[in-house]
Amino acid sequence: MPGSRTGRPPAQRRVSRPPAPRAPRENPLITLYHRARRAWDRPLTAYYLILGGSLLITGLGLVMVYSASQITALQMSLPGSFFFRKQFLAAAIGTVLLLVASRMPVKLHRALAYPILAGAVFLMALVQVPGIGMAVNGNQNWISLGGSFQIQPSEFGKLALVLWSADLLARKQDKKLLTQWKHMLVPLVPVSFLLLGLIMLGGDMGTAIILTAILFGLLWLAGAPTRLFAGVLSVAALIGVILIKTSPNRMARLACIGATEPRSGAADCWQAVHGIYALASGGIFGSGLGASVEKWGQLPEAHTDFIFAVTGEELGLAGTLSVLALFAALGYAGIRVAGRTEDPFVRYAAGGVTTWITAQAVINVGAVLGLLPIAGVPLPLFSYGGSALLPTMFAIGLLIAFARDEPAARAALAMRQPRFGRKRAGGPGLGRGPRRWNTMRRRASAARSSGER
């Protein structure tokens, strides 16, 4: 072959090739949507939403309780962190209850249904005994435990109703008795009315509304016919109208819906109006954490029933929407757990807990926004109050246990392996393989040539 003067072979001519057609670029929004959809449909999505959402709500609630309760504590000649320390203690105990409930098998939850119901009924009856029960804000619903610690048994009645009703309906469904209206109503409705009667003896209609919502949620999950559902609803609505009409205080609260200025006379809308003032002065991002003006004596119950108003004033619209988004995610996860299970007890219990938390959140937020009458119910996991926080966190533990018990979730959790060590089948000794970093170093050494240093 002839060479060039330099002795090098002649350069080959480059053949120009037409450029390969580029794949059409997908819309980034569509890509993001598909990724979010795949992440949303993963087996452990409900588990992470329940665990993460509840912990975020509780943590943010602790911050807002500390901010909203300082002035109230100082006005009572108490340390500024008094209410925060009590709430933190309740949250710590509630976290232990959450972990215990999340690890308990379903059979143990069912076994605890009757003892919890019996204990709740006993304590709720004990409230009405003179010298034992005590009145707070006109409602005889509390039992003093000594010092500044009190307990509200009606809060534990919600948990008792959910567990007992779920076990009752599950056993009747297994025996195929729910097709008969008498088995669907008895003894579910009489026991529910017993709890409602004990609560209404103390005058707490807000908690009675929550228990009524739980009852109707369970009847709807059990497949109650429309006639039966409408009949029970009509009876409950009639009883509610009678209780409201016969109480001037409840009529005054009803008259404050949509009020924009404080009124004088029977319908004193001071609390409702100042809750709106707090939300209105917050703007988009709020006045800053701890910078609320309404909590300086203008807004009653700033750290309990109206803590959402202080959140709107200090954290603005962004903060309130974040809280609502967390509750919406928690509600969606509970509905997903109830809809995907094949165990009737899990379905009824998850549906009852979800109805309880979402209904209570809607009633509290609706009262703060002036869309509903002030019912005196706290915002779940967020407002101050250990009696409300403890059973709610136990109920969240129930949802976590049910979410972990889904077949797909169990398989996903079983596939997980430790980060720094793995078990190797047929290995020496106890079958425990080498550390991960050691394995990686040995692989890198084997890839080198014999003369490489």
Image (cartoon, rainbow, N blue to C red):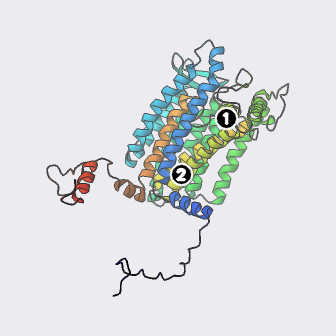
| Residue type at the position of mark 2 | Ala
Image point (66%, 36%), residue name: 206
Note whether residue 43 is visible: yes
Looking at this view, name the residue that lies furthest to the top: 77
Cα gap from disc 1 to disc 2, whole angstroms: 26 Å
**SS category of the residue bearing label 1:** helix
Answer left or right for 220 relative to 279: left
**SS category of the residue bearing label 2:** helix
Q: Which residue is mark 1?
A: 315
Tell me the mark number nearer the camera, choosing from 1 and 2: 1
Note whether residue 179 is visible: no
Rendered location of residue 62, percent (x, y): 56, 30
Answer left or right for 414 relative to 147: left
**Foreground pick, 205 / 67:** 67
**Foreground pick, 153 / 381:** 381
Up-down: is 338 above or below 14?
above
Answer left or right for 139 relative to 273: left
Up-down: is 254 above or below 150?
below
Rendered location of residue 173, percent (x, y): 47, 58
Answer left or right for 439 relative to 176: left
Sequence-wise first label, 1 or 2:
1
Looking at this view, name the residue that lies furthest to the front: 5
| Residue type at the position of mark 1 | Leu
Looking at this view, name the residue that lies furthest to the bottom: 1
Looking at this view, name the residue that lies furthest to the left: 429
Quarter of the image for residue 361 reads: top right
Q: Which mark is residue 333?
A: 2
**Foreground pick, 105 / 228:** 105
Count neighbours of disc 1 (C-alpha within 10 A) and say few if under 14, some if 14 to 19, many if 20 or more: many
Image point (36%, 83%), residue name: 3
